Amino acid sequence: VTAKETTVTSKIYDLIYSGASPDQVKEDLLPLLDFQEEGIPMQALSRMVTERLTPHLVQYSHPAFHSLYNFFPEKGALLGGGVALRYNQGVTNWQVSPGGVMLEELCLQALCRLFEFPHTSDATFMYCGTYANQQALYLALHRHAEAHGFDLAQKGLKGFSHPERLAVVVSQDAHFSLKHAVRSLGLGEDSLVVIPSDAKFRLDVQHLRLKLPELKKMKDIFCIVTTAGTTSTGTIEPILPLIEISRDIGAWLHVDGAYGFAYSLLPELKILFIGSEQADSVAWDPHKQFGVPIPNSVLFLQRKSDFERMAIYGEYFNRKDDPEPNPGLKSPPSTRPLSALPLVTTLRYLGLNGIRARLRAPLQAIQSLAEELSSASDIQVCNQPQTGILCLRYLSPHLSEKHSDGLQRYLYDRTKTEGIRSISMTRIADKLALRLVAISPTVTFDSLWDTVEYLRKSAQEYKPA
Ligand SMILES: Cc1ncc(COP(=O)(O)O)c(C=O)c1O
């Protein structure tokens, strides 16, 4: 296989990715999937992967990558990730990896202290934020069943006399993983009570308070979810008032901090997270900002004892009387990666000061951009960024509301096709908006500004259908 046979050339490295179409990518990749009886020499295989696949992978460290939460591994993470990969340790129990399970347990205890959870707390590594949210809701429902006098693990939903009343309160901007969670718990999406957001894109606590008396007549609310860093705008929703409400009604309070919780390490933002240390559970994705290999997610619990709700003991594995640490009892997968190691090596290599500097730089860039654009006549700034996300709408005096949405879609599609910059799109108050995410330290004010100018130029070429 030579470079000439592929659809792309080396200049693609200036791009976010090759810019190839799905058909071109497929054509390049098919020879890799030609499974044969005989193996091929390592050198040829390596060239094949480098030439046929890597051009089509996204350059997350590109300064013009402003769309999603992905990150190339940073140096400390590469060290830990390399060792984890070389030894391919499963981290279920002592027998599988004494060093792995002890490192995981110690790392999680240290993280509980770092994020100021109480001494009763504990945590587990999860495959992703989606599963962390799902497990939090299961634990909430398990505790609710216990209050109703039965064991959810044994009886399931049929233990409830009125399962149709079971409900989870979420905000309008909650991540779609909460839908997955209620689907897989067998509750269905109808069990989500969606509370509208206020003018600042936060779960409207006042609205919830007013609605509660009527809700309580019709529903058994077993969990309230607040999002610390919503996916659309990066807003930190209220935590403390929801802790109060959840305690009043006997519900579990889960904080979905998959994206935002990392920013609680910044002293200047800490105030936004007050109350998270009292939540029943908090989900956090180090694989979003920390530059650690995917998967790397954490679920914190206020009470270590709540993990017992997950435990399934076996005869050959995960025995109840095993005296050693057994992290595999805290979440369903019995084969679990050594996620702790790259996180530990990142934290030790960069130090907390280095981590804070990496978190802070892109936030400052996005805030400066919001300020700079606040007086622009052709761009509407949709949110005042609390974290690293800024949503914009390009405007034209000649466009109706309907065509304004068309303009945002045109800009998004065109940017995606050209492949030299990467942005995302969201919906805010029923209107399409372009979403810029600053997560990597390579994203600066200048690189964001170049994207704004690129979109401005493209907007001039928009012709409504
Ligand atoms: C707020 C929030 N929650 C949950 C998730 C899901 O996390 P994961 O992609 O790790 O499953 C995301 C992902 O972007 C998110 O932004």
Image (cartoon, rainbow, N blue to C red):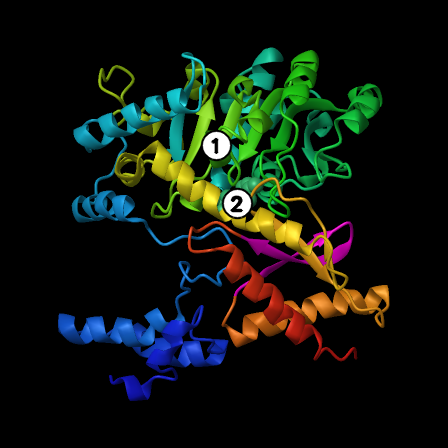
- Percent position of residue 123, x then y: 40, 25
Q: Amino acid at mark 1?
A: Leu
The picture quadrant where one finds residue 76 is: top left
Q: Nearer the viewer, residue 201 or 187?
A: 201
Q: Is residue 424 magenta?
A: yes
Q: Nearer the viewer, residue 63 or 25?
A: 63
Q: Who's the residue at 45% across and 14% down the image?
A: 118
Q: In the rendered view, does 153 fall on the left or right side of 379?
A: left
Answer above or below: position of 96 versus 176: above
Answer above or below: position of 434 versus 107: below
Q: In the rendered view, does 447 fall on the left or right side of 245?
A: left
Q: Is residue 210 magenta?
A: no
| Bounds of the magenta segment | 422-437
Q: Which residue is mark 1?
A: 266
- Percent position of residue 91, x then y: 26, 34
Q: Main secondary structure of the magenta part?
A: strand
Q: Residues within 10 Å of mark 2 (few under 14, many from 20)?
A: many
Q: Amino acid at mark 2?
A: Leu
Measure the C-alpha gap from mark 2 to mark 1: 11 Å
Q: Who's the residue at 33% across and 69% down the image?
A: 54
* Sequence-earlier tag: 2 or 1: 1
Q: In the rendered view, does 273 fall on the left or right side of 95?
A: right
Q: In the rendered view, does 29 fall on the left or right side of 426?
A: left
Q: Which residue is mark 2?
A: 363
Q: Who's the residue at 49% across and 48% down the image?
A: 362
- Percent position of residue 290, x then y: 39, 43
